[in-house]
Image (spheres, helix red, strand yellow):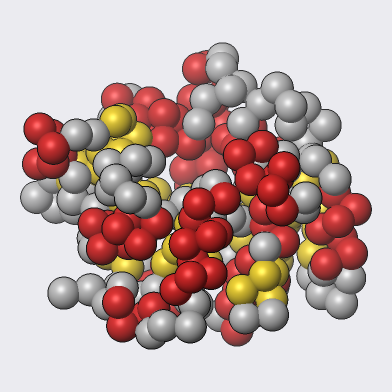
Amino acid sequence: MKLVLLAAGKSSRIFDKIKKNKCLIKINNKSLIQSIIDNAYQSSIKDIDIITGFKPENIKIDLKDYKHINYIKNAKYKTTDMVYSALLSLKKKKEDTIISYTDIFYERDIFKQLLKNKTKSITLPYISNWKKVWSLRKKNIFDDAETFRLDSKANLKEIGNKISKKNLKFINGQFMGIIYIPKKYISKVIKFYENYNNHKIQFTGFLNYLISNKIKINCIKYKKFWYEFDDYDDLNNFNKLKNSNIKKLLKNN
């Protein structure tokens, strides 16, 4: 199993405030990217690619004591998006792969779930208690939330479109920024991306594109702690809460 960590972007919505790569935000004395890698190591995932772009030296300094790290630079990070970054790794070596954003905090149980996954399909973990999570992150829970619609067999039907109170029925949860792609799907994913011919497409848009081309995407519910640092408000709100029992607040019903 390979882990691909996406850390190429500048993160302009937060960089001007924190003056460092977003993946270097510290939680419990560890950067976000350190926490993800530690969780991977503890789950026996030792093959790790980190896609860098903006200020890669900062990330390398933060991870100077970590082993089994392969750095891949996205020289086009200013004009591409995360799918392009992920494919830089997928094209190098085709094997079962977990792709993860690096502006998120989560527990290692997610790797256990994905390693035990028996569907052999592209798989997305998702949080079902999204309203509770978003109420901690945003004054308006519809800010930054998107559609995430499943069929009766927990296969993805729609993702990434804007929501409102009128289309809450299209929300069975929220995307976590983590994708598992089995080896047998890697070549198909690469081909679909190249056919799409849009290097700025975001992951949710690309996942919708895969669905429209009859690629099955299975979804599994994640029941532990998760948080996203999308902008400075997310960081500020987390810092206000960190002395509280956040895990209890976010516990699924």
**Would residue 58 appear left or right of 97 to someone viewing this image?**
right
- For the C terminus, the quadrant is bottom left
- Residue name at image x 28 percent, y 48 percent: 141
Towards the viewer: 212 or 162? 162
> Is 65 above or below relative to 149?
below
Q: Which x, y percent locates residue 145?
A: 32, 43
**Would residue 216 appear left or right of 23 to someone viewing this image?**
left
Towards the viewer: 238 or 154? 238
The count of marks equals 0
Does residue 220 show up? no
Towards the viewer: 70 or 66? 66
Q: Which x, y percent locates residue 178?
A: 47, 55
Quarter location, residue 3: bottom right
> Is 204 above or below relative to 92?
above
**Would residue 23 appear left or right of 222 to someone viewing this image?**
right
- For the N terminus, the quadrant is bottom right
Towards the viewer: 150 or 233? 233
> Is 123 above or below relative to 91?
below
Does residue 175 show up? yes
Q: Which x, y percent locates residue 103?
A: 58, 55
Q: Which x, y percent locates residue 24?
A: 72, 61
- Residue name at image x 31 percent, y 73 percent: 250
**Would residue 115 appear left or right of 79 to someone viewing this image?**
left
Quarter location, residue 110: bottom left
- Residue name at image x 44 percent, y 73 percent: 241
- Residue name at image x 50 percent, y 17 percent: 196
Quarter location, residue 43: bottom right
